[in-house]
Image (cartoon, helix red, strand yellow):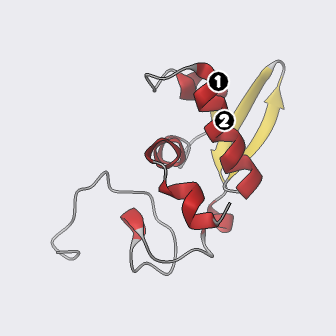
């Protein structure tokens, strides 16, 4: 899957947003969605396989965080249109500078 296809799904964008500034377990991430655990797990797998999130194990839990360096090579499209580096999405709100 192409990198922009990976981040095109709103659920995957939301996951990246959730783990942008902190680590979260898969269960914590899943609790933020009104979809099945398997759907969230599938999104996490796509993000991990693309290298956009890093997974580590802590006991029986899997902990995720965004790999900002991996996202730095993508430009254009979506919430980060025109950006040369990735920044945390602004949840659709634009600053006066962006208008």
Q: Residue at x 39, y 74 (%)?
A: 81
Position above or below: 99 against 65: below
Q: Is residue 33 left or right of residue 40?
A: left
SS type, badge 2: helix
Which image quarter holds the C terminus? bottom left
Q: Residue at x 46, y 26 (%)?
A: 32
Q: Residues within 10 Å of mark 2 (few under 14, many from 20)?
A: few
Label drawn at residue 4: none
In the picture as drawn, the residue positioned furthest to the front comes out as 1
Quadrant in the picture for residue 45:
top right
Question: From this viewpoint, is residue 86 visible?
Answer: yes
Question: From this viewpoint, is residue 25 visible?
Answer: no
Of 55 and 36, nearer the camera is 36
Position above or below: 36 against 2: above
Q: Position of residue 80 (x, y in %)?
A: 41, 68
Q: Badge 1 is on which residue? A: 38
Which image quarter holds the N terminus? bottom right
Q: Badge 2 is on which residue? A: 42
SS type, badge 1: helix
Quadrant in the picture for residue 4:
bottom right
Q: Are marks 2 and 1 in contact (CB under 8 Å)?
A: yes
Q: Residue at x 60, y 21 (%)?
A: 37
Q: CA distance from mark 2 to mark 1?
A: 6 Å
Of 79 and 25, nearer the camera is 79
Q: Position of residue 65 (x, y in %)?
A: 65, 45
Q: Position of residue 40 (x, y in %)?
A: 59, 30
Quadrant in the picture for residue 42:
top right
Q: Residue at x 62, y 65 (%)?
A: 3
Q: Is residue 61 left or right of residue 85?
A: right
Position above or below: 21 against 40: below
Q: Residues within 10 Å of mark 1 (few under 14, many from 20)?
A: few
């Amino acid at each position: 899957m192409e990198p922009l296809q990976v981040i095109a799904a709103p659920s995957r964008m939301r996951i990246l947003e959730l783990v942008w500034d902190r680590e979260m377990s898969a269960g914590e991430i899943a609790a933020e969605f009104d979809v099945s655990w398997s759907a969230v797990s599938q999104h996490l797998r796509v993000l991990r396989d693309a290298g956009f999130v890093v997974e580590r194990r802590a006991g029986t839990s899997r902990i995720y965080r965004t790999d900002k360096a991996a996202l730095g090579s993508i430009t254009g499209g979506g919430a980060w249109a025109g950006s040369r580096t990735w920044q945390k999405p602004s949840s659709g709100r634009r600053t006066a500078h962006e208008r």
